[in-house]
Image (cartoon, rainbow, N blue to C red):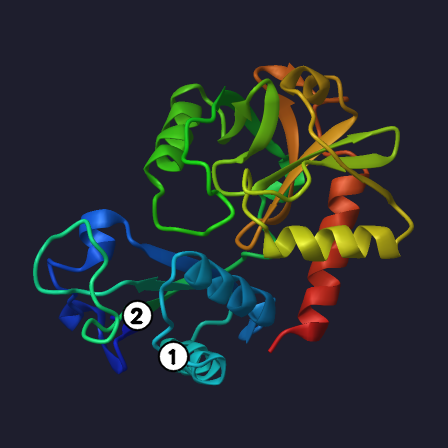
Amino acid sequence: MTRTVYVNGDYLPETEATVSIFDRGFLMADGVYEVTSVLGGKLIDFDGHAVRLQRSLDELEMRSPISKEDLLEVHRELLRVNEIDEGMIYLQITRGAPGDRDFVFPDPETTTPTIVLFTQNKPGLANSPAAQKGMKVISIDDIRWGRRDIKTVQLLYPSMGKMMAKKAGADDAWMIEDGYVTEGTSNNAYIVKGNKIITRALSNDILHGITRAAVLRFAQEAQMEVEERNFTIDEAKKADEAFITSASTFVMPVVEIDGVALGEGVPGRVAPRLREIYLEESLKAAV
């Protein structure tokens, strides 16, 4: 089935969707994005994604071409026409197409931002087999720019990191800076030691994950101890458990780091329980 997508106020078949070659998202990676998961035909953590989207726009001095209320309606309409029960909605806003290429930002009064949304159908998203067996990660140097807290479309190095992992027979990569783990290529990273969940504190060094915030809140409500601090890859290899969180994977156990098995090499107790709690609570609040 041909998807219906949303481009600059219009719903149209994906085969007819176009964006200018002068769009700054294409030429300069001058854009931001969000990915919202869909379970049971409803949006997970929509408010959190909308708030982070506005923060990213503000940090780049980019105006939004749509209100939060209208954005929600666009999401819902795309779910309806594309008949999505489980999957994701990708949203991207760029600074627009000024008509030529220039490093200087175009006048926001004369250049309208570009907005694009499309759906991805992912049956079985909540019951992913990967969550049952866990994932393997490798470590790589973190050589990204310094404002990783802004969710920009500058994703070349994370993409390269995933390819490095694939070539090494792993599922993903954790990035290392100054000896410490920052995050995964498209997710936040955690270790568990002695029933304590350890993850890097928020800063410009990592993305302020929406799923991260929810999972840590649910962990504390479940009387689990959480410590936000830096940890090394060597510390991670000696952990009892490890896991990642993201909008598309929810909570995913990590069972091996750089070829070193964690615990017995299978998902432990904490990550699966957090995944269960997250899915249960998020579905209750889904819109």
Question: Callout 1, which amino acid?
Answer: Ile
In the displayed orientation, state which residue is furthest to the right. 223
- Residue 259 lies, with reference to residue 55, above or below; the image says above
Q: Which mark is residue 85?
A: none
Task: Tell me the residue at 38%/72% (across/down).
Answer: 64
**Amino acid type, mark 2:** Ile
Question: Crowding at label 1, few (<14), some or many (≥20) Cα neighbours within 10 Å?
Answer: some
x and y percentages locating residue 2 in the rendered image: 24, 70
| Percent coordinates x, y for residue 47 in the rendering | 59, 71
The answer to whether residue 145 shows anywhere in this view is yes
Q: CA distance from mark 1 to mark 2?
A: 8 Å
Image quarter in which the N terminus is found: bottom left
Residue labelled with disc 1: 66
Q: Is residue 137 left or right of residue 113?
A: right
Position of residue 195 relative to residue 224, above or below, is above
Q: Secondary structure at mark 2?
A: strand
- Quarter of the rendering containing residue 168: top left
- Name the residue located 63 percent from the left edge and 55 percent from the top edge: 211
Query: Image check: 172 left or right of 210?
Result: left
Whole-percent x and y of residue 272? 74, 44
Q: Where, by quadrant of the figure, is residue 190 drawn?
A: top right
Kind of element beneath mark 1: loop
Q: Would residue 44 be visible to someone looking at this image?
A: no
Q: Position of residue 147 (x, y in %)?
A: 46, 42
Whichever of callouts 1 and 2 sits on the residue coming sooner in the sequence is 1
* Nearer to the camera, 122 or 62: 62
Contact, mark 1 vs mark 2 (Cβ under 8 Å): yes
Name the residue at 11% across, 53% down.
101
Q: Nearer the viewer, residue 201 or 242?
A: 201
Residue ID for mark 2: 115
